[in-house]
Amino acid sequence: MTMRSAVITFPGSNCDRDMVVALEQLSRTSVARVWHRDTSLPEGLDLIALPGGFSYGDYLRAGAMAANSPIMREVVRAAERGVPVLGVCNGFQVLAESGLLPGALMRNASQNYICRTVGLRVENNRTRFTSAMAEGQEIRIPIAHHDGNYFADPETLEQLEGDGRIVFRYTENPNGSRNDIAGVISEKGNVLGMMPHPERAIDQAHGGTDGRAIFESLLESLEPA
Amino acid sequence: MKIRIHVSLKPGVLDPQGRAVHHALEGLGFEGVKDVRIGRIIELDVASDTSDERIDEMCRTLLANTVIENYRIEKGDE
């Protein structure tokens, strides 16, 4: 099974190459690279990935400028058609700023940039991004961010909790996120945003391979039933 | 036309930066500071025929994130 994927690069993205490498290794096919000023996406995509980094220097708010870039209009349109979208770290911030995911990512409660491997609990494995994992499974994935403090108002949080849309939770909250939230999914289940970097945990040389399961889940979801 | 956009965190949204500054003020011996909230001011110089609606749209589209922030538009004196 092949997976046609595209990785978006914004000025200031710095995990785009890592995302391409992860996708190419695990899907065994080449990955399209799309620039922020492009105004169209390749046809027939199975996945659009928004990588980590500091798009547009994180000016104004992390992800705010990127959310209004030309290519994001196409990403929003594709997401509305049901194309799967994965946003990691800055990619999650862009998805929140663009309104594809609820809430906002604020400055870490400690005010510090945090770069370390953290524990995550898989809260919902009935998604195309997590089906290769068990519910309640604990995985270890690196984080590297200054603005990962997830905020949503109480009504939104209640709705997310009730609908199983909190996909990953930190086992020890590193950044002050409400309800220990590390990753949330859209109502239709095709857009996932997460602060931890699965693409940085796909090779033993990374110190762990727990990130592979997310890409393997996506591949599985394409298998004919 | 000069416009000032005052962007502030909504009440109830924790402001880690404000809290750090609050601690710093206390550390410096300034007593009686009850709370510190940090926002930003964005100054725009726009064409004089720019409508209020258009300015509001700028705020909602880009300048403020209404999930966490409020904004107030102040028209400056020429």
Image: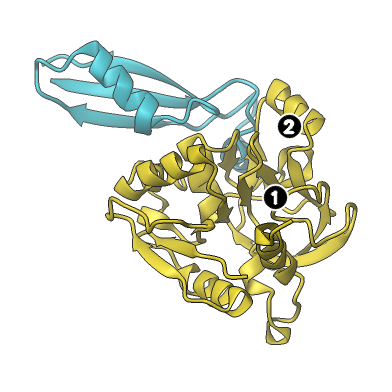
Chain colours: A yellow, B cyan
Q: Quick check: A216 left or right of A161?
A: left
Residue at the image point whose x is 45% and y is 56% from the top: A44
x, y percent for residue A101:
58, 37
Residue B78 lies in what quarter of the image? top left
Residue at the image point whose x is 33% and y is 56% from the top: A36
Residue B5 lies in what quarter of the image? top left
Are dots 1 and 2 in contact, CB under 8 Å?
no
Q: Name the residue under label 2.
A: A160
x, y percent for residue B48:
9, 17
Q: Nearer the viewer, residue A214 or A157?
A: A214
Q: Which amino acid does label 1 sit on?
A: Asn
Q: Name the residue under label 1.
A: A175
Q: Which of A210 and A52 is in front in this view?
A: A210
Helix or strand or loop: what does disc 2 sit on? Answer: helix
Instruction: Choose mark 1 or mark 2, whichever is in front.
Output: 2
Of the numbered discs in the image, which one, if any, rests on residue A148?
none
- Marks 1 and 2, Cα distance to the nearest angstrom? 19 Å
The chain letter for the residue carrying disc 2 is: A
Against A195, residue A157 (above or below) is above
Residue at the image point whose x is 20% and y is 16% from the top: B76
